[in-house]
Image (spheres, rainbow, N blue to C red):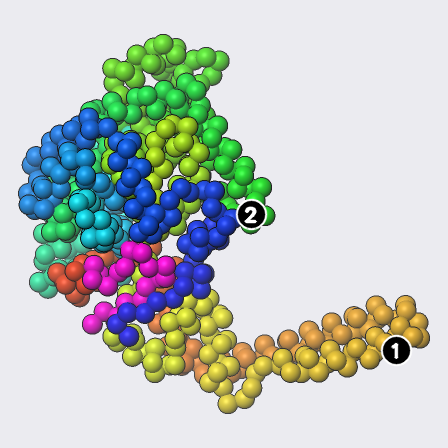
Amino acid sequence: MDVDCISYRSTGFFSKLILDYISQEESVANLYSNSPDLNGIKNQIKEKENHFPSSNREVLSAVLEKQYKNLNTSESTRQNITALKDSKTFTIVTGHQLNLFTGPLYFLYKIISTINLAKKIEEENPGYKIVPVYWMATEDHDFDEINYFNFRGKKIQWNKEVSGAVGKLSTKGLKDVFLILEQEFGTSKNANYLKDVFKNAYLKHDTLTEATRYLANEFFKAYGLVIVDGDAKELKQKLIPYVKKDVFNTLAYTEVSKTIQDIQKSSDKYNVQVNPREINYFYLLDGLRERIIEKNGFYHINNTENTFTKEQLEKELEAYPERFSPNVIARPLYQEVILPNLCYIGGGGEIAYWLELKSMFKVMEVPYPVVLLRNSALLITSKQVNKMDKMGLSISDLFLKQNNLINKKIREISNINIDFSEQRTYLQEQFVSMYTMAEQTDKSFLGAVKAQEIKQLKGLDALEKRLLKAQKLKLKDHVTRMSNLQNELFPNHSLQERKSNFSEFYLEYGEDLIPYLITKLDPLSKNFTVLEME
């Protein structure tokens, strides 16, 4: 098999909004600017080239040099940081939380999509340099979302009382996690490497930001990946005018709310991913990240006694911009303000909320980027492919709901035909004449005829289900093997990439894993990829 694919629509795991966006349906055309393809990105280059000040480039490069000061990285990454000063250099960016040991497998797919797209755009646009960027979500505060990873069905978790932005969290206490990981990983060459990476990242760095930067650099420095921490005063200074428009004029709230109303009025009835707040910024201090709320002309920091007048808050912003932290609505704007960015790559949920923001970007006078769905993949071992072949399972079969899969295959392999479609059709045809007879005799009998038809059809359904159940018992071994295989590939009936950690595969394939994925994943593919791991 090596590489196969299935349409996103056929997987059953993606929202209608995302499916329509991938297909470029007319119903979503007003939610984005340039299309998520090479032509759209070529147009984006021209737009960003005319709307990104050189002073922002100098600040960005200087901040990155400071953030990379104590990190041993590749020459290609160093060159990319320097190149960001040049007006012909642009970025492709993805973002991700600071999940423990990268969290779900799709962390790799996000960054690989970004690296591959940067390379492809650079090849298609001579004279321009394109830098892949990973934006660390250092200012997030939901620790419960990031304090664990799953390994072979087990949850390896970091238990800690925390508050404030996760990037500033001390890594103290992670030695206990390492001891658990050490037992689970074993003693192979690949296991020892992963244990060293974990130790170097989390036990030799003081904060979660530093640990995550080390981790991402370790795996992707060879590809020139640049890792950005937006929690920096020099970068936040560039955000000040936009914070004012959000906090004091509620521009973001007004514009995103309009877009949401349009989405909800649409006949397609798309789900709304996130809702804006009147103020889309938090107040950030060590151990504190709380919402800014306006009441009666005063600005309160939620869950604290801190209160500002408009003039006081404006002075605070000018003096300490690093204390203002964007939420999920404002963070995309922040990224586009400080990065010479062409395209944001994210998962389905991320793309869904980016599609709410075009109008906000317009009133803020910042170019709205191309937004692209990251690669999604299912990794299957050769052994699992052999099992599929023996059971006559196709890739599309694997994505069926388990009960539907079992019923479908039982009907296919059973020595009796457990499908009463023909009998249902025959029965319904017989009742046509009975309806005619009742119509001509006494219309009051029509209800009785209908009730009898429903009763007979239900009887056929019940009999079909009983026969199918009996065949499942008779073919119990086949059912068990199918169920076990699907459960291996779809942990907890979810996509593998959302549950499994990369370490499960690294233990088996080692340093070949990431190069293999980079070779096989096409960032502009409009299909879900299935990869056989040799």
Residue 459 in percent (x, y) is at 69, 77
Q: Secondary structure at mark 2?
A: loop
Residue 320 in percent (x, y) is at 25, 18
Name the residue: 25% across, 44% down: 92
Label 2 is placed on what type of residue?
Lys
* Quadrant where the image shows the N terminus: bottom left
Q: Earlier in the sequence, mark 1 or mark 2?
A: 2
Q: Determine which quarter of the picture holds residue 87.
A: top left
Residue at the farthest bottom position: 415
Compared with 4, 347 (above or below) is above
Asked if the stretch drawn in magenta spans residue 352, the answer is: no
Residue 193 in percent (x, y) is at 10, 56
Label 1 is placed on what type of residue?
Met
Name the residue: 16% across, 60% down: 515
**Image disc number at residue 92:** none
Nearest the camera: 170 or 250?
A: 250
Nearest the camera: 345 or 404?
A: 345
Is label 1 or label 2 in front? 2
Q: Secondary structure at mark 1?
A: helix
- Residue interval drawn in magenta: 517-534
Compared with 121, 325 (above or below) is above
Mark 2 = which residue?
269
Compared with 15, 468 (above or below) is below
Mark 1 = which residue?
437
Compared with 297, 53 (above or below) is below
Structural distance between the alpha carbons of marks 1 and 2: 44 Å
Residue 52 in percent (x, y) is at 26, 31
